Amino acid sequence: MLFLFGRSMPVGLTRYFAEKARDNGDRVMFASMGSFGSSEAFSELKVSPDVLHGQPVAVFQSLAQAGDFSANDYFTQMLIAGDTLKRYGAGPLWAVVPFGPYARQDQERAGKMDSVACDAAARFLSQDYVGISTVEIHSAKAQNLLENRFGAANVFSINPTGIFEQDTASFQLRLPVVVSPDQGANARADSLAAVLGADRFYVDKVRSEIINTRIAGSRGEVAGRDAIMVDDMVDTFGTAMKSAELVRGKGASRVFFYASHPVLSHPAWERLAKLVGDGVIDHVGLGDTVARGAEFENFRQQYGPAIADKISFVPTQELLYRHVKEIVAPHPAMQRKMG
């Protein structure tokens, strides 16, 4: 099987796949990208067409801003890469998108004309890709939109609960309680609570617009207990900050925060430093679904190890590799002869 990595993927994850490929007879390819002076995007696949010959390809790309490129740039690269691979004789293509395609824009509300961008992105991707896998899709609505385009059997939301549970093992949790910062996080919090044998605490978040939220209340008991907050993504750290301050104010002995996707747009890094520095959060574990290595090094230099050492990027590489080899590679859609 061939693996093609776009520019947005973490170096450690790419290296892991490259090492596994050498051991198992697979091959790793890379796509570079840039833009002309007019900002027109271009993408170049670093592979000879001779190696394709109907071979199935798993294309890896996260759709979040990283480095000098935006999520829109990376999405364009996926479209160009898919078209290029098909033109040069590749077999079936599968999109492995650790951070999913515009999944936050999945709502249709009365009196509004919100763009359902998740569906629009899936429509374009499904022209060249037979299936899609992502780490913890944002919502059931987003998953349904993807399934309508790719087919229910060709869409996978990979559960990261196991890697978060492993990360907590070194902290010797005391009377753990798992916190969901909003209703949308209940399912993932329930999953982690079941693995840890923990109780639950609920934060009720109200959303007035796409990016405006407030906390309306809470339910449960955290006093004298270790509170483990879990969410699918962290963007500005606004909701996480309010929820962490809430559970700390209610007497939680320690507060842990986990999120699958470190989107981390402004002012996330500053808020993160304050939450850790002020002792509101004791440990932060973020999935490595988006390349954040360079930014984290800048963070470490600015705030020092006393704060930076309380933040870790939890590797998803083994989880993704097993999924691709055990689910994607033998999938009937990837076994079809093309052309």
Image: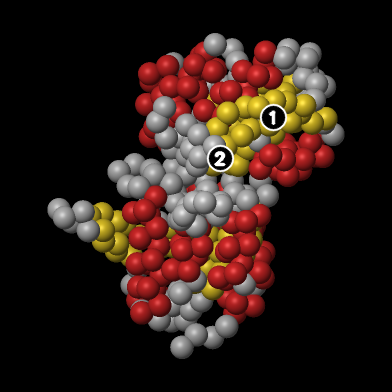
Question: Residue 12: x, y in percent?
Answer: 48, 44
Q: Amino acid at mark 2?
A: Met
Question: Residue 102: x, y in percent?
Answer: 48, 53
**Residue named by callout 2:** 233
Residue at (55, 70) in percent of width and height: 149
**Residue named by callout 1:** 203
Q: Is residue 278 something one can see in this rendering?
A: yes
Foreground residue among 204 and 229: 204
Seen from this angle, which residue lies furthest bottom?
A: 339
Which badge, 1 or 2, comes first in the chain's sequence?
1
Q: Which numbered marker is on residue 147?
A: none
Callout 1: SS: strand
Quarter of the image where one finds residue 302: top left
Residue at (58, 63) in percent of width and height: 145
Look at the image and name its color scheme: secondary structure
Callout 2: SS: strand
Q: Amino acid at mark 1?
A: Val
Label 1: how many Cα within 10 Å (few below 14, some 14–19, many 20+): many
Quarter of the image where one finds residue 231: top right
